[in-house]
Image (cartoon, rainbow, N blue to C red):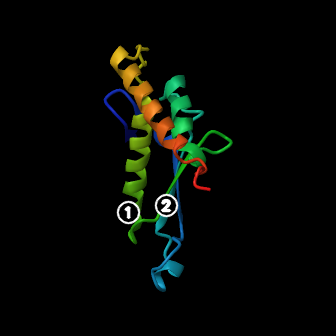
Amino acid sequence: MLRINDDIALKDWELSERFVRASGPGGQNVNKVSSAVELRFEAARSPSLPRAAKARLKRLAGRRWTRDGAVVIRCDTTRSQARNRELARERLAALVARALERPRRRIATRPTLASKRRRLEAKTRRGAVKSLRGKVSGED
């Protein structure tokens, strides 16, 4: 069981781990030991997450979201299998926690009169600078 917050915990059947060989430097050890971990969370089938959180999780996960609705997190940061497993679980917990946060609704406001004036003055100055970039004439 992976606890996300006080209300939500992911059950063991929703998570699966697979240990694979890590890529990159590591000498002969990298060819012998499967120290990298692929943590798979069945997000689409999870009863733990509300529908809105699943939609946010899909957007946040990006390429880590699979076609069948799972989030796959790969970790090969350290040479220790146990530490990679911990890191992958922490990353998943952080990702799900971010997905559980409801985004604040933006309150539409009008720009102030002073900000409108500043914007128009800046545009005027910029236009004046650009008008001076034309061809030079009158010296012939």
Residue 10 seen by the camera: no
Kind of residue at badge 2: Val
Q: Which residue is labeled 2 in the image?
A: 37
Residue 103, percent from left and from top:
42, 25
In the shown orientation, is residue 62 left or right of residue 10? right
Residue 121, percent from left and from top:
41, 28
Look at the numbered disc 2 and give the secondary structure of its residue.
Answer: strand
**Nearest the camera: 130 or 111?**
130
Question: 17 above or below 43?
Answer: below
First-in-chain label (1 vs 2): 2
Q: Residue at left 54%, top 24%?
A: 51
Marks 1 and 2 sit apart, C-alpha to C-alpha, by 9 Å
Residue 114, percent from left and from top:
33, 19
Question: 108 above or below 92?
Answer: above
Residue extending farthest front:
140
Density class for disc 2 (Cα within 10 Å; few <14, some 14-19, many ≥20) is: many
**Nearest the camera: 18 or 68?**
68
Give residue 128's mark: none
Q: Residue at left 44%, top 37%?
A: 96
Q: Quadrant of the C terminus?
A: bottom right
Q: Residue at left 31%, top 29%?
A: 6
Instruction: Using the rendered view, name the quadrant where residue 93 is placed.
Output: top left
Q: Quadrant of the N terminus?
A: top left
Instruction: Using the rendered view, name the quadrant where residue 115 is placed.
Output: top left
**Nearest the camera: 111 or 7?**
111
Look at the numbered disc 1 and give the secondary structure of its residue.
Answer: helix
Kind of residue at badge 1: Ala
Q: Residue at left 37%, top 26%?
A: 118
Q: Which residue is labeled 1 in the image?
A: 82
